[in-house]
Image (tube, rainbow, N blue to C red):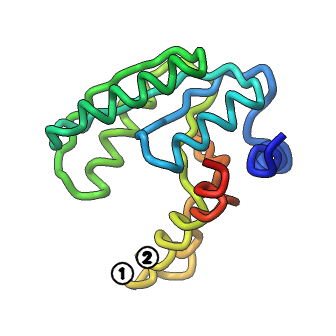
Amino acid sequence: MHGFVQKVSRRIREKGLIQPTEHVVLAVSGGPDSVSMARAFASLRYRISIAWVDHGHRPSARLDGELVARLAASLNAPFISLRASPTSVSEAGLRDARYAELSALEGDCIAPARTANDQAETVLMRMIRGSGISGLSGIPDRRGRFVRPLLGMTRKDVLAYL
């Protein structure tokens, strides 16, 4: 088993993120982080579905959706295409719309592909905005049904795996 997959498995176990029998909905954009997550979960033989969200503001997004659909087929995973209606095209507006669509899906947990690099960026942005100590906590490992199994991985880890 590849070291990246072992690291993902260990993090899931140590953080108690996902039980072996649970159905996991993977939020896959088609980028390296989410593609590596999908491949790792398939290797670990989790029961997965792959969800892709079109925010409706990029004409080329259709190509991303086709790529993710092909990835799902190659992993023998159900593919779910969603259409979000963001109230703004800001990062927060897109994220809120995406999470709202994903929240409506059936599954025990939902896994966006957030990495240690995203974590560092989040903390830095909160510092720049003048957040207090409590606001500097970053992205949680779990919030409700949302779990983040890649928070311990870096972009370098992801690219080395792919």
Q: What residue is shown at x 52% (from left), y 14% (from top)?
A: 78
Callout 2 crowding tier (Cα within 10 Å): few <14, some 14–19, many ≥20: some
Residue closer to the observer: 114 or 39: 39
Kind of element beneath mark 2 = helix
Lateral position of residue 69 relative to residue 97, left or right: right
Q: Are marks 2 and 1 in contact (CB under 8 Å)?
A: yes
Q: Is residue 117 above or below residue 41?
A: below
- Quarter occupied by residue 74: top right
Work out how far the residue at label 2 is from the one at label 1, CA to CA, in angstroms: 5 Å
Please state the horizontal and vertical placement of residue 150, each as a whole percent of the image.
64, 51
Please state the horizontal and vertical placement of residue 151, each as a whole percent of the image.
64, 57
Lateral position of residue 104 relative to residue 78, left or right: left
Q: In the image, what residue type sits under mark 1? A: Arg
Q: Is residue 8 above or below residue 24?
A: below
Disc number at residue 76?
Answer: none
Find disc 2 in the rendering and name its residue.
Answer: 126
Task: Evaluate whether residue 5 shows in this view.
Answer: yes
Q: Is residue 6 above or below residue 48?
A: below
Quarter of the image where the N terminus is located:
top right
Lateral position of residue 88 relative to residue 131, left or right: left
- Quarter occupied by residue 51: top left
Q: In the image, what residue type sits under mark 2? A: Arg
Q: What residue is shown at x 50% (from left), y 49% (from top)?
A: 32
Find disc 1 in the rendering and name its residue.
Answer: 129
Q: What residue is shown at x 26% (from left), y 51% (from top)?
A: 93
Q: What residue is shown at x 20% (from left), y 35% (from top)?
A: 85
Please state the horizontal and vertical placement of residue 34, each as a whole percent of the image.
52, 43
Kind of element beneath mark 1 = loop
- Quarter occupied by residue 66: top left
